[in-house]
Amino acid sequence: MLKKIVFSFILIFSFSIDAANNKVGDVDLGEVTHSKAFQFIKDNMLGKWEGTLTQHSGNVIEASYNFKLLSNGNTIREDLVEDGVEMFTTYSDKDGVLVIKHYCALGTEPMFKVAKLSNNSISFESDPSPGYHKDHHNFVNSISWKLSDKDTLSMKNSIFLDGKIENNKAQIKRVY
């Protein structure tokens, strides 16, 4: 039993050293500089958040958002659950610009670009490259996040449904 514990400690310790050296095996992962928008999400939004989302109709549903840093610190994955329906969004930089892609319950995969960034908020607008059109597709058109304090966020989004825009908003608190 003691041998297993010692072996586990050595394995964990050696992995920690390799991770600190920015390597996977013998592959040097290099250094990456992130955009201000990526850094904003990393610095302010990592962790699990829970609260409610008020839909365009006034209907209030449970919502949770979990932001996790992956891919050697180069991608943030947001797992979101709204009224029990799971979706996710990825945030990563390409050539110094934040790229956002949402895998939506509406059956579309809209992409976004940063529209505005401040000390306590970030907003995204639709990137036209996926080719979605409001008259032919249902998709999220915009998203914004605003920090009231380090543990309280509000989110607003607009969605095209059957050619009409619907606005939703969420109030969430950090769980961890």
Image: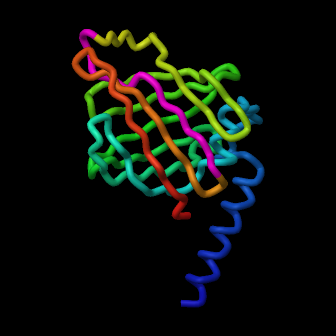
The location of residue 49, given as percent across then percent down, is 49, 55
Q: How is the image coloured?
A: rainbow
Side of 48 where 151 appears, left or right: right
Side of 84 where 69 appears, left or right: right
The location of residue 121, given as percent across then percent down, is 64, 37
Location of residue 95 with respect to 173 vertically, above or below: above
The location of residue 66, given as percent across then percent down, is 48, 52
The answer to whether any part of residue 25 appears in the image is no
Location of residue 12 with respect to 6 vertically, above or below: above
Residue 9: quadrant of the picture: bottom right
Side of 120 where 87 appears, left or right: left
The residue sitting at the bottom extreme is 1
Residue positioned 60% across, 48% down in the render = 45
Residue positioned 40% across, 46% down in the render = 80
The answer to whether any part of residue 44 appears in the image is yes
Which quarter of the image is occupied by the C terminus?
A: bottom right
Q: Is residue 137 magenta?
A: yes
Residue positioned 33% across, 10% down in the render = 133
The location of residue 14, given as percent across then percent down, is 70, 64
The dominant secondary structure in magenta is strand
Q: Is residue 149 magenta?
A: no
* Magenta-tinted stretch: 135-148
Q: Nearer the viewer, residue 119 or 72?
A: 119
Residue positioned 33% across, 21% down in the render = 165
Location of residue 114 with respect to 69 vertically, above or below: above
Q: How many marks?
A: 0
Q: Nearer the viewer, residue 31 or 95?
A: 95
